[in-house]
Image (tube, rainbow, N blue to C red):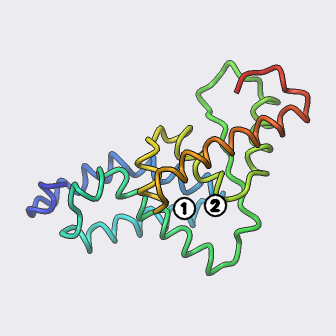
Amino acid sequence: MIAYQNGDDAALNEIYILYKNPLYSFVFRYTREEQLSIDIVQDTFMRLQRYKHRYTSEKGNLKSFLFQIAYRLMVNKLNRRKKWQSLLPFLVPLENDEMHHVDRMTIRDAVAKLPEIHRAVILLFYYHDMSQQEIAEILNIPLGTVKSRLHKSIQLLKEELEVKDYGSRSF
């Protein structure tokens, strides 16, 4: 990022290559809309270009900074479209071959029933491997709130999965 801030435009391309797919995955899991997700990722990098001199390492690492931009853009776009009630993140990791398809769908359905504030934390923590501090920065909430939401989210998921007779499985 420092190289890009100092005028090396090729550095932006490297940043784009590194973060385009994780940002797209994050946004798409929320919106389930391909074009909207592409637009938000593009807008994220346009905003980075426009405000590149505002970024400092004190604001967190670049990954957190970009996810925060993408999250805020997504929330703003979705609020304008009034689609919060129809959001269904699909938080099933594709690389986990041990989990049966039905189990993945059951977990996905359980996550979809979580309140929005809990879904965001689960998505960032478990599927984007972000630290609690990074999540706090992205969602602009205190670290303690992230911790309590993670705890509550897991509790809610366990309750939902036990109702479906999955109580013996570890989560």
Residue that protrudes farthest toward the left in the picture? 6
Q: Residue at x 69, y 38 (%)?
A: 154
Nearer the observer, 37 or 120: 120
Say which quarter of the image contains residue 151. Answer: top right
Which residue carries the number 1 mark?
A: 37
Q: Residue furthest front?
A: 144
**112 left or right of 8?**
right
Residue located at (23% from left, 56% from top): 58
Image side of residue 121 versus residue 87, left or right: left
Front residue (pair 50, 115) = 115
Q: Label 2 amino acid?
A: Thr
Q: Which residue is mark 2?
A: 31
Q: Position of residue 2 (x, y in %)?
A: 14, 55
Local secondary structure at mark 1: helix
Q: Residue 117 falls in which quadrant of the image?
A: bottom right
Q: Secondary structure at mark 2?
A: helix
Q: Residue 83, position in %: x, y?
A: 71, 72
Residue 54 drawn at (x, y percent) = 22, 69
N-term mark: 1 or 2? 2
Q: Could you tell me if the residues under marks 1 and 2 are in contact, i.e. CB atoms within 8 Å?
A: yes
Question: Which quadrant does the N terminus fall into?
Answer: bottom left
* Residue 149 % position (x, y): 62, 49
**In the image, what residue occupies the spot 41% across and 70% down?**
43
Query: Alpha-carbon neighbours of circle 2 within 10 Å: few (<14), some, or many (≥20)?
Result: many
